[in-house]
Image (cartoon, rainbow, N blue to C red):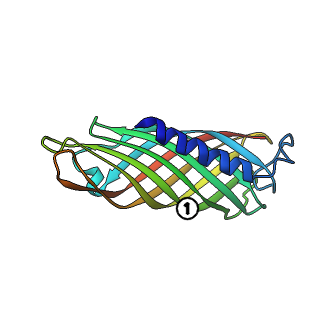
């Protein structure tokens, strides 16, 4: 079941990268420069709530991100994240959206972001239900700030809220179950421009 999810995410990433003009690939870009690419790693705390958050605690989760600056203000942002909670809940999310730089304080850039995502939720329950696996569509909102350490490297903080729309599935025991809810997260991120 994991291979179709990985193929879907790889296809989504290839589509996004294929649609982005690469003429500025080798240029060093500073935050907010049009045509600049950036990518990096992120990790932080994820707190599930709602149906998916029942009986689970928050946990540390790793992720990766990619951004393409369309102008000094707006950028496309893609995030991939995997979190696991108490061996009862596993979420793999792929989100894409728009990031808007709010202002520039020297080399500190606060921003707001909004987008949509696909959330692959695997919730383990007590027998006779066992596992409830769904693919949910959802919305995400976030606030963050990046600090340019140099023209090429940056780090920052990101606070996000993800709202998963309800998705129902039939379990092997013949019981209809729903996965829905939301999760919030606080991430530290570090990246490089290319």
- Answer with left or right where residue 179 lies relative to residue 44: left
- Pinpoint residue 139: horizontal percent, then vertical percent: 47, 62
- Answer with left or right where residue 67 lies relative to residue 165: right
Image quarter of the N terminus: top left
Residue closer to the observer: 79 or 6: 6
Residue closer to the observer: 25 or 60: 25
The residue shown at (58%, 61%) is: 113
Q: Which residue is mark 1?
A: 115
- Answer with left or right where residue 33 lies relative to residue 86: right
Dot 1 falls on a residue whose secondary structure is strand
Where residue 41 sits, quadrant-wise, is: top right
Count of numbered circles on the image: 1
The residue shown at (26%, 39%) is: 88
The residue shown at (12%, 43%) is: 128
The residue shown at (41%, 40%) is: 83
- Pinpoint residue 164: horizontal percent, then vertical percent: 39, 59
Looking at the image, is 98 positioned above or below residue 1?
below
- Pinpoint residue 40: horizontal percent, then vertical percent: 64, 39
């Amino acid at each position: 079941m994991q291979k179709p999810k990985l193929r879907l995410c790889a296809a989504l990433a290839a589509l996004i990268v294929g649609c982005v003009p690469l003429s500025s690939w080798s240029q060093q870009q500073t935050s907010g420069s049009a045509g600049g690419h950036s990518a990096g790693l992120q990790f932080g705390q994820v707190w599930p709530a709602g149906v998916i958050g029942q009986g689970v605690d928050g946990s540390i989760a790793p992720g990766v991100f990619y951004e393409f600056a369309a102008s000094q203000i707006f950028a496309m942002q893609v995030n991939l994240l995997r979190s696991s909670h108490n061996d009862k809940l596993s979420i793999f999310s792929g989100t894409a959206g728009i990031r808007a730089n709010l202002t520039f304080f020297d080399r500190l850039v606060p921003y707001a972001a909004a987008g949509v995502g696909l959330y692959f939720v695997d919730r383990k329950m007590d027998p006779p239900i066992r596992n409830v696996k769904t693919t949910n569509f959802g919305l995400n909102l976030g606030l963050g700030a990046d600090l340019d350490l140099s023209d090429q490297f940056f780090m920052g903080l990101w606070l996000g809220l993800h709202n998963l729309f309800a998705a129902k599935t039939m379990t092997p025991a013949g019981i209809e179950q729903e996965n829905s809810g939301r999760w919030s997260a606080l991430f530290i991120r570090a990246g490089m421009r290319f």
